[in-house]
Image (tube, rainbow, N blue to C red):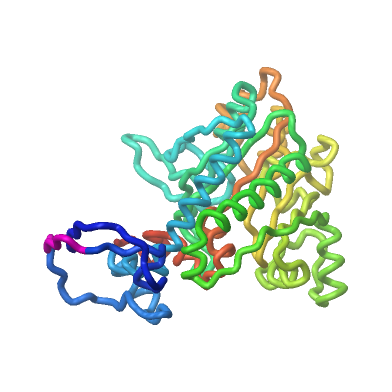
């Protein structure tokens, strides 16, 4: 590293050395620290090093302008997310990361010892953002979450960051509109404020369109046009998500009205009927991949207890949660967007690990 003092002047020729159109007329130069031979290449028009080797040497990898550009853009994504919801009158909250029971159900939690008790790393802020919706009414958060799933794919992580909202007195369709508007705002802000970084990455970012298709309409469309053989109750496979993205390029696709059986216990069944086949739950896709899930939540404690039992969960473990709805809780809805996945899709990255400073997956715990 060196310290250079001098006069900033307009560059005669714009180049990779003077991307911002300025240069320094050097008056003094001081060596601060010598560099050893680099373990990876950080120059060149393309990134040629193996991703695993780059992640082993992440602090050096970030010297590559194309790599650091990803995280400068990601910083603007979170900044724009916050800006959008602050301007809409939302409050930012910080939910706990250490919890006493599963927040989504299932067994995909990291168990930790919490003094003499069992505890878990939060797989979602879901229960906590619902518990305060009666008082704060409109909240958002950017928070880490953990999933103990043995994935080894280009789209999954065991530690990631979620951008969540929850809104009182709002329906499934109302929070879908929030999502459409928020993603478009984020893309617009990144396009305007990160021109240099987008140019470095060769990304031509355009503000997306939006479209809403019900779950049944999506199945019918994919079966008709792509012969996918999907039936009610099926989740969308990565192949189905990709084909849907091809049918509607550069489009945020909201898919409401999913079957209750494949949605979490806290998603409201249609008509507040515990036996309803369909729910007020939704997924949202962008760039050929799911980026969000959410919907209207159950605000009726007895119905919530019934749904917990139907999912094979013990209501006693969730009394702190179900009891919070016994005091006139209104209807409410919300969603979450994976920060790293949105970054990956906006920039056309090939692996989600490229959108994480220090990824955590089943094989990587350091650096």
Residue 231 shows in this picture:
yes
How many numbered discs, if any? 0
Q: Quadrant of the N terminus?
A: bottom left
Q: Residue at x 86, y 66 (%)?
A: 220
Left or right: residue 346 compared with residue 27: right
The answer to whether 37 appears left or right of 337 in the picture is left
Residue 346 in the image: above or below residue 90? below
Give the residue drawn at x 57%, y 58%: 191
In the rendered view, does 145 fall on the left or right side of 13?
A: right
Q: Position of residue 179 (x, y in %)?
A: 68, 47
Magenta region's main secondary structure?
Answer: strand
Along the line of sight, which residue is nearer the eye, 267 or 348? 348
Give the image quarter of residue 22: bottom left
Depth check, front residue: 342 or 105: 342
Q: Which residue appears at 64% of the width and 26% of the height? A: 137
Is residue 318 in the magenta section?
A: no
């Amino acid at each position: 590293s060196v310290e250079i003092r001098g006069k900033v002047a307009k560059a005669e020729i714009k180049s990779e050395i003077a991307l911002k159109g300025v240069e320094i007329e050097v008056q003094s130069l001081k060596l601060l620290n010598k560099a050893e031979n680099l373990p990876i290449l950080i120059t060149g028009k393309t990134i040629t090093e193996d991703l695993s080797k780059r992640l082993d040497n992440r602090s050096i990898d970030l010297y590559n302008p194309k790599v650091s550009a990803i995280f400068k853009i990601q910083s603007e994504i979170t900044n724009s997310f916050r800006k959008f919801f602050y301007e809409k009158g939302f409050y930012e909250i910080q939910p706990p990361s250490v919890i006493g029971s599963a927040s989504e159900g299932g067994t995909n939690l990291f168990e930790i010892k919490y003094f003499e008790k069992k505890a878990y790393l939060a797989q979602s802020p879901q229960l906590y953002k619902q518990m305060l919706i009666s008082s704060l009414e409109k909240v958002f958060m950017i928070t880490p979450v953990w999933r103990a799933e043995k994935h080894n794919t280009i789209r999954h992580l065991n530690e990631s960051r979620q951008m969540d909202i929850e809104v009182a007195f709002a329906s499934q369709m109302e929070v879908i509109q929030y999502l459409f508007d928020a993603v478009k705002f984020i893309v617009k802000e990144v396009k305007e404020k990160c021109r240099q970084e987008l140019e470095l990455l060769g990304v031509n970012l355009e503000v997306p369109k939006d479209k809403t298709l019900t779950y049944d309409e999506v199945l019918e469309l994919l079966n008709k046009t792509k012969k996918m053989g999907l039936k009610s109750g099926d989740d969308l496979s990565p192949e189905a998500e990709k084909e849907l993205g091809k049918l509607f390029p550069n489009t945020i696709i909201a898919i409401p009205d999913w079957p209750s059986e494949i949605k979490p216990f806290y998603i409201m069944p249609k008509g507040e009927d515990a036996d309803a086949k369909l729910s007020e739950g939704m997924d949202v896709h962008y760039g050929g991949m799911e980026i969000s899930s959410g919907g209207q939540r159950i605000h009726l404690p007895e119905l919530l207890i019934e749904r917990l039992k139907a999912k094979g969960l013990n209501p006693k473990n969730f009394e702190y949660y179900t009891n919070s709805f016994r005091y006139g809780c209104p209807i409410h809805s919300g969603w979450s967007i994976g920060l790293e996945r949105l970054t990956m899709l906006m920039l056309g990255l090939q692996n989600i690990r490229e959108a994480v400073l220090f990824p955590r997956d089943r094989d990587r715990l350091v650096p």
